[in-house]
Image (tube, helix red, strand yellow):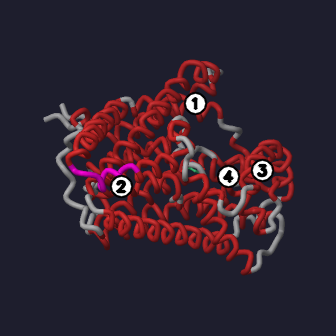
Amino acid sequence: MRKLALHWQILIGMAAGVLFGVVASQIGGADFVKDWIKPFGTIFINSLKLIAVPLIFASLVKGISDLKDISKLSKMGGRTILIYLGTTLTAVLVGLLLVNIIGPGKGLEESTRDKLMADFAGDAGEKIKAATAQTEAGPLQALIDLVPSNLFHSLTDNGSMLQVIFFAIFFAIGLILIDPKKAKPVKDFFDGANEVILKLIDLIMLAAPYGVFALLAALVVESPSADLFFALIKYSLCVLLGLSILIFGIYPLLVKSYTGFSYSRFFQGISPAQLLAFSTSSSAATLPVTMERVEEHLGVDEEVTSFVLPIGATINMDGTSLYQAMAAVFIAQAFGMDLTLGQQVGIVSTATLASIGAAAVPGAGMVMLVIVLGQAGIPEAGLALIFAVDRPLDMCRTVANVTGDATVAMLVGKSVDKLHEPRERKLDDYYKPEE
Ligand code: ASP
């Protein structure tokens, strides 16, 4: 019997989860789902997060010390940051273009607007409070935050991934610079640790179809009523169109034209990570799987993935930046404000920076949206308008974020000659089709 490919298994899990959630809501089983199904989704996400930090650490130390030469690192680093900025700016521009052409906020009924404002004022207030802390920091705070004063402190906090990345790169540079004889046992240790963690990802992925089932069933029973969703349908479709242009247009085209990888091979390789991004709404939780897919199925060497992907998961959020630009203009439109060109240019820069600063966790893009709104002079309380549809849109923008990271990893890989035919599915034995 042939075993189904992983992405089909995950898709079936997702569909079954949605169906289960819908039926449970209808027959009054919402509490059952919350008490007995949702915890398995939480366990699944926790297990992914659990290995994210050790994975970043081990793979970065191994990857960078394999480079043997620091000049290669700076070459790769420069390209990575430049391409990340390029894709983020493109995403913001696509978003602005669409939202100005379609104008989803212009037709929003006043009564709907008032209802949304009343219903979600409290939720919006919380996000605004969370964002205030970020805006109060000085201009160089991000740089200060990059360098931890205590490594163990950073290792215990999934929100401090950039600090872990910083230390791992610093450590690996030291490893390159010392006597190779002394460096060897340390490198061997990280090599082995890295293999173990990759194997753990395979094991966790065995549970992926069940994990996404639980996540989606819980999401359905906990989602707010559908009426408000339909009031925001034009805005939602507008964001979805923008994200689709990125995911199905710009990224595969970039990959095809620069690396020769066909559309279908690209999606076959990356789709399990995309599906997990959708189910978990978190680029950070998806990172272990993104790394495994890009390395084993899209053929990028670990020297590149270990560097490009963890950085991408934390700073490159094209879907988030597109959404922030669109949401800001939508809110302005709904309030009858006409944004000047200057304000829109301001949105380009703040949405780019805000997406870089957003954490790779569910709902983070919305917190940073407060900053975009503030800079553009749009009422921050307008956040309440888009609350009802934030979660489904978050799921979709996370797919764009993860796909963008994978694309850039392939481009950087190709540019430094570290892209090859994907290896045999060495670590994939668990879900390899059986003959
Ligand atoms: N959930 C997104 C991510 O993890 C961030 C966001 O836009 O809220 O990539």
Q: Give the range drawn in magenta.
A: 171-180
- The kind of residue on which mark 1 rests is Ala
- Image location (x, y in percent) of residue 403: 43, 56
Quarter of the figure with the N terminus? top left
Instruction: Give the CA distance from mark 3 to mark 1.
Output: 26 Å
Q: Quadrant of residue 257?
A: bottom left
- Secondary-structure class at tag 1: helix
Residue 179 magenta-drawn? yes
Mark 4 or mark 3, which has the lower sequence index? 3
Q: Is residue 337 above or below residue 44?
A: below
- Secondary-structure class at tag 3: helix
Mark 4, residue position? 366
Mark 4 or mark 1, which has the lower sequence index? 1
Q: Residues within 10 Å of mark 1 (few under 14, many from 20)?
A: many
Side of 141 where 85 appears, left or right? left
Residue 427 magenta-drawn? no
Mark 2, residue position? 173
Whether the residue carrying mark 1 lies under 8 Å from ligand 1 is answered with no
Instruction: Give the CA distance from mark 2 to mark 4.
Output: 36 Å
Mark 2 or mark 3, which has the lower sequence index? 3
